Image: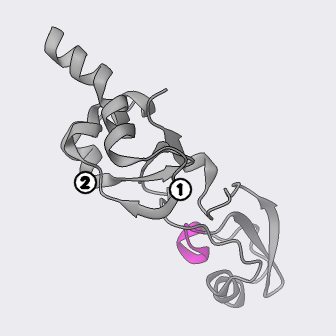
Amino acid sequence: MMVAISALMLAPQVARAQICRAGETDAATRAIPEAVAPAIIAAFHANMTSPQVIRNGVIRCVDGQLMACLAGANLNCGKADTSQVNRGAAEWCRTHPNADFVPAFASGHQTIYDWRCDGSRPMITRQIAHVDKDGFVVEHWQRVGT
């Protein structure tokens, strides 16, 4: 038990030292190394195993800090879609005029907006996510370690 706790406590330091250099920002997402998975589980308070985290997540460096994202049914770990024109919403509205909302499967999980239909035209109802300077949804990413 003591070994597992020590490994968990060291993982963030190992991650920062071996993955992110001081001040480094890399907008490319990368696979999660096995040694870092326990620290990501702790950062997200995730009820997942290391193999699940490795399979469902990605990492990147932001200002020298290791950041992680765990993809879920509706979570996008890639770049956000900030466009105020949405072809999926437009198609939905053509076939569902005056719909109160456009489902995410139609508008795409990358969009940062909720959509509805004004007649057959898509309309943004509100912004539902924020985008960082590198184009990722802030709410989907968690800093790993201290």
Badges 2 and 1: C-beta atoms under 8 Å apart?
no
Query: What residue is shown at x 37% (from left), y 31% (from top)?
Result: 12
Whichever of callouts 2 and 1 sits on the residue coming sooner in the sequence is 1
Dot 1: few (<14), some (14–19), or many (≥20) neighbours within 10 Å?
some
Position of 146 with respect to 139 (left or right) is left
Which residue lies most toward the top here?
2
Rendered view: 109 above or below 9: below
Q: Which residues are magenta?
A: 104-110
* Residue on which disc 2 sits: 55
- Secondary structure under tag 2 reads helix
Whether 4 is among the magenta residues is no
Residue occupying the point 72% across, 64% down:
114
One can see residue 23 in this view: yes
Residue 107 lies, in percent from the top left, at 61, 75
Instruction: Name the residue nearer the viewer: 38 or 105.
Output: 38
Horizontal side, residue 53 vs residue 118: left or right? left
Q: How many badges with numbers are in the image?
A: 2
Give the residue pinned by disc 1.
Answer: 25
Question: Can you tell which mark lies on residue 114?
Answer: none
145 versus 105 height, above or below: above
